[in-house]
């Protein structure tokens, strides 16, 4: 399954969910007629473009779905595995698979679907696929130079073309609608059908409406991080945003309280500053971390209180606003930021001739904090930066 945020589907449940999805996927393929080789190869002969329509539609729905999940912070797109592109092996492998598709009448996924209902030709096709796998595995030392030639890394097409994700999605959906229309013309010509490829029936109007809705929806889901980053550029908005805050004295007290296991200090300074001086109970964070799966587990721990700290309060407020907009709760900021904390606590100069009991208590507490916190800092082990693990999930058609 995808890297959902929060991680509502655990590792063990992943396999059960994947099994259920696989079963329904097979049922849908069979109901769509993909267990019949004549329907599948119709794409190559021009008399049936069902394969193009079904898989093109599936790709578009998946694209818009991922854009929506990313927009609402429900998926960590950085953990979505993208297969590396080796140009020559992709071209040659595609030609071999296409030839096998035409000759055998199946692709790997549809062959399993057909074999499940007892199609003998599909069973033979699967046996041939295994034979091909064995040949490739045994001859890998020979094929390896070609297999790894022209490594293009992990490209995303809209980045390669230098356009925004939304515009690329919009263009791709329009291209799909054009492909559906053009393939209908070819189908009608090959099958000798005189009817126009597009008719104003509820079926065609419904398809057109869904396509237009999907195309427009591409602009409804701008990149979440970009929109929130733009939001907090307005300093007046940032300063007027209502946030919970704690004083430097309360912060110092909670740092010294070893029994306080609810406090989590989320530090947004640079990595160098953090490693030079890391406060107790703190973890180094970045803006990107708040959109990722692994950090989400830390920010959503039960009974915890997250104190966002940075050198200045304005930066703290910006990070806390982003966190609030992403749905994180129990977020507070440190009044005055760490610059104020260091000045008034770690570098505290006692008030001479205190005039009232408050100043007496302030002298007493901050003098104690000035002695204890540096010791705690020295004994604390820096936690950060947050590490994310990119794992490849094997599977798919």
Image (cartoon, rainbow, N blue to C red):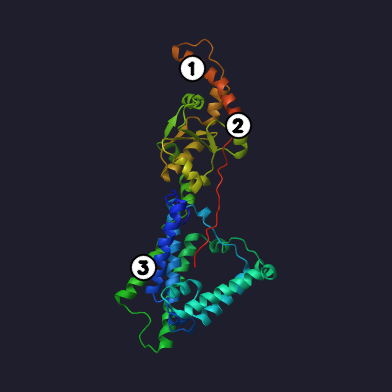
Q: Secondary structure at mark 2?
A: loop
**Residue 128 x %, y %:** 55, 77
Q: Disc 3 or 1, which lies upstream in sequence? A: 3
Q: Position of residue 156 (x, y in %)?
A: 55, 62
Reading the image, the residue beneath label 1 is 362
- Disc assigned to residue 210: 3
Q: Is residue 14 above or below residue 43?
A: above
Q: Secondary structure at mark 3?
A: helix
SS assignment at label 1? helix
Q: Quadrant of residue 115?
A: bottom left
Left or right? Give the position of 127 relative to 54: right
- Tally of numbered tags: 3
Rounded to the nearest whole Å, what is the CA distance between mark 2 and mark 1?
24 Å
| Left or right of 384 on screen, residue 177 | left
> What residue is shown with label 2?
277
Picture residue at 44% right of the left edge, 12% below the top: 357
Q: Which callout, 3 or 2, points at the residue further toward the start of the chain?
A: 3
Q: Nearer the viewer, residue 170 or 303?
A: 303
The label nearer to you, 3 versus 2, is 2
Viewer-proximal residue, 388 or 327? 388
370 up-or-down from 123: above or below:
above
Which label number is shown at residue 138? none
């Amino acid at each position: 399954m995808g890297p959902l945020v929060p991680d509502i589907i655990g590792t063990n449940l992943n396999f059960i969910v994947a099994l259920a999805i696989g079963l329904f996927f097979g049922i849908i393929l069979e109901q769509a007629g993909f267990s019949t080789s004549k329907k599948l190869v119709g794409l190559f002969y021009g008399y049936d473009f069902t394969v193009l329509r079904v898989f093109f539609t599936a790709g578009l729905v998946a694209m818009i779905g991922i854009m929506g999940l990313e927009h609402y912070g429900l998926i960590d797109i950085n953990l979505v595995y993208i297969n590396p592109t080796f140009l020559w092996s992709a071209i040659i492998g595609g030609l071999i698979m296409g030839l096998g598709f035409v000759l055998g009448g199946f692709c790997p996924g549809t062959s399993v679907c057909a074999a499940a209902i007892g199609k003998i030709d599909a069973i033979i096709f699967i046996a041939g696929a295994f034979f091909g796998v064995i040949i490739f595995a045994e001859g890998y030392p020979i094929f390896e130079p070609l297999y790894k030639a022209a490594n293009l890394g992990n490209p995303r097409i809209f980045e390669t073309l230098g356009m925004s994700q939304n515009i690329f999605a919009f263009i791709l959906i329009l291209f799909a609608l054009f492909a559906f229309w053009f393939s209908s013309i070819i189908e009608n010509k090959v099958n000798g059908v005189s009817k126009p490829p597009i008719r104003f029936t509820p079926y065609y109007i419904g398809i057109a409406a869904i396509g237009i809705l999907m195309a427009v929806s591409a602009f409804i889901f701008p990149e979440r991080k970009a929109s929130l980053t733009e939001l907090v550029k307005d300093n007046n908005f940032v300063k007027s945003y209502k946030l919970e805050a704690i004083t430097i004295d309360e912060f110092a007290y909670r740092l010294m309280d070893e029994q306080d296991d609810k406090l989590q200090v989320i530090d947004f300074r640079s990595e160098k500053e953090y490693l030079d001086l890391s406060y107790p109970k703190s973890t180094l964070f970045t803006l990107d971390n708040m959109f990722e799966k692994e950090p989400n587990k830390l920010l959503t721990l039960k009974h915890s209180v997250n104190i966002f700290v940075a050198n200045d309060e304005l930066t703290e407020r910006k990070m806390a606003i982003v966190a609030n907009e992403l749905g994180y709760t129990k977020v507070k900021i440190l009044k005055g930021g760490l610059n104020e904390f260091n000045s008034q606590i770690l570098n505290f100069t006692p008030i001479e001739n205190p005039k009232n009991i408050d100043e007496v208590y302030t002298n007493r507490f901050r003098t104690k904090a000035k002695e204890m916190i540096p010791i705690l800092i020295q004994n604390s082990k820096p936690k950060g930066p947050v590490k994310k693990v990119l794992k490849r999930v094997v599977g798919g058609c």
